[in-house]
Amino acid sequence: MPRLVGYLARRVLQAVPILLGIAIFNCLLLHLAPGDAADVLAGEAGGASEEYLAQMKAKFGLDQPLYVQLGRYLANVATLDLGFSFRHNMAVADLIGGRLPATLLLMVTAVAVAFALGIVLGVTAARHVRRPIDGLVSVIALLAYATPIFWIGLMMILLFSVHLGWLPSGGMMTVGTDLSAFDRLADIARHMVLPTVTLALFYLALYTRLMRASMLEIYGQDFVTTARAKGLDERRVAYRHVFRNAVLPMITMLGLQVGSLLGGSVLVETVFGWPGLGRLAFEAVFQRDHNLLLGILLVSSLLVVGINVLVDLAYAKLDPRIELR
Amino acid sequence: MKDFLRRFARNRPALAGAVILLAVVAMALLAPTLYPDNPWDMVAEPFLAPGADPGYPLGTDMMGRDLAAGIFHGARVSLVVGLVATAVAVLLGVTIGALAGYFGGWVDDVLMRLTELFQTIPAFLFAIVLVAIFQPSVTTVVLAIGVVSWPPVARLTRGEFLSLRSREFVQACIAMGMGDLRIIVLHCLPNALAPIVVTGSLMVATAILTEAGLAFLGLGDPNVMSWGTIIGAGREVLRTAWYVCALPGIAILLTVLAINLVGEGVNDALNPKLRNR
């Protein structure tokens, strides 16, 4: 147990320079952006006098030299103050906190689906390598790997919502109805189907390909030949011997894909009107709400670091040969 | 080279990919000749279904713009952005990875921390932020995609250089008193090129998908017709005119698929031993 605590403490310490770097980036980007918050607000109000503009800049600290602004930004970030969104008239941290659960729900469900199905398809393909079923799985994976996710999302809306009318085309729940707790959950689940499948499809392709390759690699090793020589049936060889070793690279991949999942959820949430972090980022772009946008970038990076620690812990748990360092 | 081509040609999926890719390149090259007018111009009545008017085989969108013209011109944008953005990423990644792997020590530490930093920030989100802050244009889109995609190239190049650094021919160059730059460019780089080329060719596909995603969100250059832009605009009329969204999406899918097939074909042809496993 003390080992675990020490490990976690070290990982948190390692994360500090990364977060510091991102915060510095954010501050520089804000500084480099053509027009600051005061200009944007003044422009929208239909122009403002020089004095008023100067007053606003002083209020936001925009008249200070860069290093002072940077210091102030870092101090704010350290106290979890990500600034203020003038559009939503809310603190950025509160806005993000309110939208985070929806995104996490979508991401976790999509990854779970992609991971489980990817294992099944990958193992099936590897067990029947170079036979028709392997070919079929590989073609599907190749297609899913090349499909733009926002496009497949739109096509699924077209098929399942517009033509067949089976599933809702957007949002997270039916508005304006009074449902019991159970019905509410069922309603959210129905709304989740299309966004989850859309987001999962690309990762399903990725995991299927990786699982197949990883299985084939382990199949070539000596201990598999030994297992077969002692008379184990193919099924047992596949699941007890090969699969257990082949699944480890999949876990590594899980950690590597967190950032890309967050990017994918911007597109999926925009297509399906899912009220999460990605949709918030999309809105922030068009409202020129740079404070909010950079806050989302920082929190997303934090999420990537955090989930990777969890993945490492899971890895060490699954493979006793790995030691936490 | 001859061996390489023969092995590549024997790989049927890769050959199919090459054919599709050539067709897309031809579309991009022919766009100004076949559709010399601005693809944004209104040329016919709006919402012509594909095949309804032989003059407009793919139909028209809600503004009466010719979809075929949009898709041909979109091929130019996708290919150019994909190629140039990848070139930027490869240039950045190779430079950083080569310096880190060749010099080691504190240079390696600093550059690898930087690489980790860029790998932690979610790439697509980072690209959105960069394009949104510096205003959408072909240049900002290309640079943004390049800036967010170099870390894997840097890691790969660093790994290659680390192992090359201790090889005898490199040690001999150092002993002869050759300059670092000359060793890096003339002796190490050519030996590290094969995996970089494979990674780079697959990155073009990702760059095209990223460009399409940005354009779909409305972060494309407002002056050029891109596949993602057409889909983003066509979204509003999805229920009535599905083909406005569907057709450019198929174009993206086929292009990305073709590049992936060709990239894997190149990989297999460069590493024939791995293929026959």
Image (spheres, coloured by chain):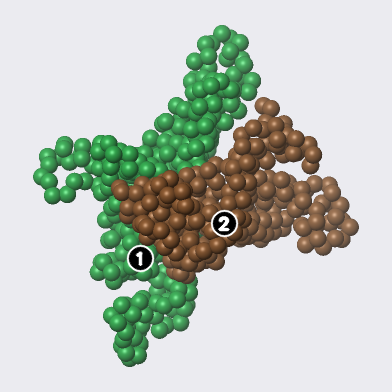
User: Which residue is at the front of the view, B144 or A260?
Assistant: B144
The subunit carrying tag 1 is A
The numbered disc on residue A249 is none
Q: Residue at position x 34%, y 86% from top?
A: A53
Residue A311 placement (x, y as % from top left): 45, 41
B124 in relation to A205, above or below: below
Marks 2, 1: nearer the viewer: 2
User: Which residue is at the front of the view, B80 or A97?
Assistant: B80
User: Label 2, on which residue?
Assistant: B34
Q: Residue at position x 33%, y 61% from top?
A: A283
Q: What colour has chain A?
A: green
User: Which residue is at the front of the view, B235 or A309?
Assistant: B235
Left or right of A160? Residue A11 is right
Circle 1 residues within 10 Å: few <14, some 14–19, many ≥20: few
User: Label 1, on which residue?
Assistant: A286
Residue extending furthest left? A178
B56 in relation to A141, above or below: below
Badge 1 amino acid: Phe
Q: Residue at position x 40%, y 71% from top?
A: A73
The subunit carrying tag 2 is B
Q: Circle 1 — which element?
A: helix
Q: Which chain is brown?
A: B
User: Which residue is at the front of the view, B140 or A50?
Assistant: B140
Residue A204 placement (x, y as % from top left): 45, 36
Residue A279 placement (x, y as % from top left): 33, 56
Q: Residue at position x 45%, y 76% from top?
A: A34
